[in-house]
Amino acid sequence: MKGIIFNVLEDMVVTQCGMSVWNELLAKHAPKDRVYVSAKSYAESELLSIVQDVAQRLNMPLQEVVKAFGQFLFNGLASRHTDVVNKFSDFTSLVMGIHDVIHLEVNKLYHEPSLPHITGRLVGNNQIALRYSSPRRLCFCAEGLLFGAAQHFKQKIQISHDTCMHTGADHCLLIIELQND
């Protein structure tokens, strides 16, 4: 897992809970004196154990915390990589460009980023079918990222997530419904 993901998680925890909580989480779940450098890779188990601890502290289901982190993550990544986000005129173009544009840019910026496989397909005028697969099974984070992108582009959406790797499927299928005011 790239350090930039940990950097944004730190921002979220500090914003929501304070620096002392972040320091407690690091002391408990990371090697001594850990400093996350955005371009370096770290064990995903560190991220997952920190997020699980946050869920316990907030008394929230893990998948809801992961989804909230995904939404926060979009804003954190977008603010650090405005040139990538500015390639898109709207939410739909961003979602349809995840594989061919965003992941291509991520591969240029970060060495061996271990990205999920994501493909989108337009269904009529107001739906996108998004297929997600990854050994990390962070589909709830992907949902949060989608909500963050929708918020960024001022697009209201609903997501149904009936096919899921967490219930035995080999991929997740997210049906994104674009809603008009």
Image (cartoon, helix red, strand yellow):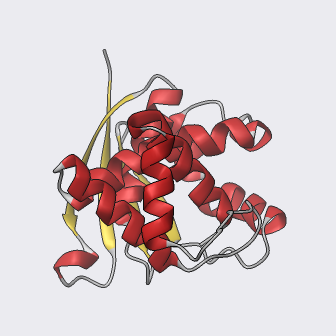
Nearer to me, 88 or 23: 23
Q: Quadrant of the C terminus?
A: top left
Q: Is residue 34 left or right of residue 122?
A: right
Above or below for 42 versus 77: below
Q: In this view, does 104 lie to the left or right of 168?
A: right
* Residue 99 seen in the figure: yes
Q: Which residue is drawn at 36% across and 65% down?
A: 139
Counting from the top left corner in percent of width and height, residue 152 is at 52, 28
Counting from the top left corner in percent of width and height, residue 80 is at 73, 41
Counting from the top left corner in percent of width and height, residue 23 is at 51, 54
Q: Is residue 109 left or right of residue 85?
A: right
The single residue placed furthest to the top in the displayed view is 181
How many circles with numbers are drawn on the protein? 0
Nearer to me, 170 or 12: 12
Q: Which residue is drawn at 68% across and 73% down?
A: 113
Q: Is residue 37 left or right of residue 70?
A: right
Above or below for 51 versus 32: above
Q: Residue at x 77, y 65 (%)?
A: 39
Q: In which quarter of the image is the N terminus?
A: bottom right
Counting from the top left corner in percent of width and height, residue 98 is at 59, 56
* Residue 160 seen in the figure: no
Above or below for 37 versus 43: above
Nearer to me, 24 or 99: 24
